[in-house]
Image (cartoon, grey):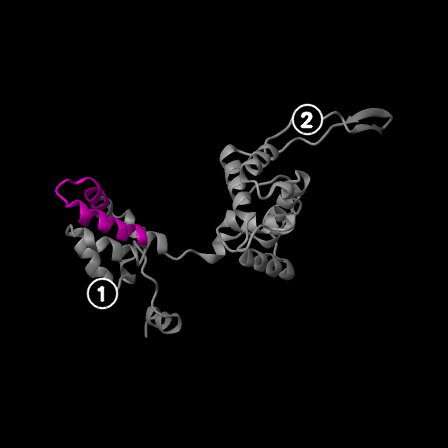
Amino acid sequence: MTERFERMITFGPPPVTFGRPETYTDKVKALYRRLKDGDYKALAPLIANDIEFLREPTAIAALVILKYDRQQPDKKANAELRKIANVIRRRPRSRGARLPYGDWLQAECNWLESLIYQNQMLKIKEKPHLLRERILDALTPKPRPAPLGWIEWNGVREEVPPEEPISIPNDQKQRICEALLAGVRTGTGHVRTAKSWAKQAIAHLHGVSAKETQKRISRDLKSGRRRRGPDVRDEVVLP
């Protein structure tokens, strides 16, 4: 008995992987031959097995032909492009890769909760236009305030500088804003607390449900798993 056969008995057949012909099933091999022969209808079922088949030059050629070749009937070409788009949209995503560690999520929730509370966003939660302006203003760095005071160090009096404002890139700022606007609403109305609002917004940022986010936080903190890097978060880095 070969090692490969033993592994197949133990773990089952390996998944179809582009670039590894030994994993191709008979069905995938047939689709691959059809695609190489110029049959663009084979592309959608082929990438349903592995999205990486889009890297095949004949797959790229098929997409170009479907999009721009005037000899192709528009209805048939558009229908085939929709099939390909639907396969890409429905393909499974790695659940483990979607969310960071629980303590990172908890830090993000705490930061958003503080942002909501300090800027009194709950008072205008039902006014989306005013709320958008308030959120963007809160995410925009402000001029540094006056010194916080003085301290003496080895007989020398030194000024205590204020904290530097956090600079957030514009695209990230817009994503946080949209997440907060989406997270303010629940299935029956609006959120009631800054904490629940922050959890809803974080869920929107990561593309998961609020329940999944809370499960990840609870599970990781209970097991002691931590993100890589310093224990104390030095700056806000949302996705």
Q: Mark 1 is on which residue type?
A: Asp
Q: Which residue is mark 2?
A: 144
Label 2 crowd bin: few (<14), some (14–19), many (20+), radius 10 Å: few
Q: Position of residue 109 (x, y in %)?
A: 61, 48
In the rendered structure, the answer to whether residue 114 lies left or right of residue 12 reads right
Q: Position of residue 205 (x, y in %)?
A: 51, 47
29 sits to left or right of 182: left
State left or right for residue 14 relative to residue 107.
Answer: left
Q: Is residue 21 visible?
A: yes
Q: Residue furthest right?
A: 155
Which portion, as a residue range, is magenta? 62-86
Residue closer to the observer: 60 or 74: 74
Per the image, label 2 sits on a secondary structure element best described as loop
Q: Reading the chain from its start, which is encountered first: label 2 or label 1?
A: 1
Depth check: give the residue in front, 150 or 215. Answer: 215
The residue that appears at 23% across and 50% down in the rendered structure is: 79
Q: Residue 18: image x %, image y %? A: 30, 54
* Secondary structure type for disc 1: helix
Q: Nearer the viewer, residue 191 or 234?
A: 191
* In the image, residue 11 above or below residue 220: below
Q: Is residue 6 magenta?
A: no
Q: Please identify the residue farthest to the left as the structure is shown.
A: 71
Q: Quadrant of residue 47?
A: bottom left
Question: What residue appears at the point 26 percent right and 56 percent down from the top-left corner?
Answer: 46
Location of residue 227 in the rendering, given as x and y in whole percent from the top left corner = 59, 51
| Mark 2 vs 1: CB contact within 8 A | no
Which of the labelled discs sits on residue 194, or is there none?
Answer: none
Identify the residue position indicated by label 1 in the image.
26
**Quarter occupied by the N terminus:** bottom left
- The crowding category of the residue bearing disc 1, from other C-alpha atoms within 10 Å (few below 14, some 14 to 19, many at least 20), is few
Q: Which amino acid, by three-letter code, is at mark 2? A: Arg
